[in-house]
Amino acid sequence: MIDLQHVARPEIATPTWIRAYSSPYSTPAGCRGVIAFPRQVLEGPQGPPPGPLPMQAVAALRAVPAMLAVGMRDTALLPQYVIPSFHLVYPDAPVVEIPGAGHFPTEDAPETLLALLELFLQTSART
């Protein structure tokens, strides 16, 4: 996981850290989603592709405040694809690129991410 998804600070990957991230996947049933997701990315979804989203659903989704904080060293969800995809749904939403972070910005840049989340919550409060 550390090598494939890039953890900018590999020293954090202690046995306790690994147990915390892996604990939800301690049974075969708990692993189904994390096994299916990469397969779907590579092979496509099972069954027929879904039809276009109803415009009402798209409008409702776009009405929700959003922000993307992306680790620019992520090798699992590549920023050059994630950022444009995010902008398709949220064309005016902010994107914050975190240069030294990988797939786990919560671990690689926790102070930066916390400040971003606090600012986002303060500025996008719904009334």
Image: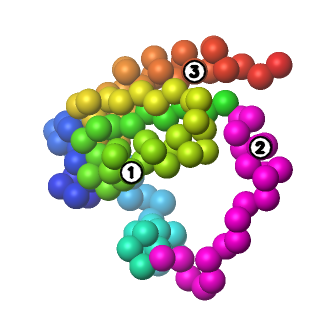
Q: Which residue is mark 1?
A: 81
Find the magenta span and give its range.
44-64
Q: Locate residue 37, reporting x and y percent.
A: 46, 68
Q: Is residue 114 above or below residue 82?
A: above
Amino acid, disc 2: Ala
Residue extending farthest bottom = 47
Q: Reply yes or no: does residue 45 show up in magenta.
A: yes
Q: Tell me, yes or no, whether the two marked residues, 1 and 3, touch with CB atoms within 8 Å.
A: no
Q: Can residue 51 be seen at all in this image of the molecule?
A: yes
Spatial separation of the CA atoms under disc 1 and disc 3: 23 Å
Q: CA distance from mark 2 to mark 1?
A: 23 Å
Of the numbered discs 1 and 3, the one sitting upstream in the chain is: 1
| Label 3 CA crowd tier, 10 Å (few <14, some 14–19, many 20+) | some
Which type of secondary structure does the marked residue at label 3 adopt?
A: helix
x and y, in percent, of residue 91 in the image: 58, 36
Q: Which of 103 and 27 lies nearest the eye of the viewer?
A: 103
Residue labelled with disc 3: 120
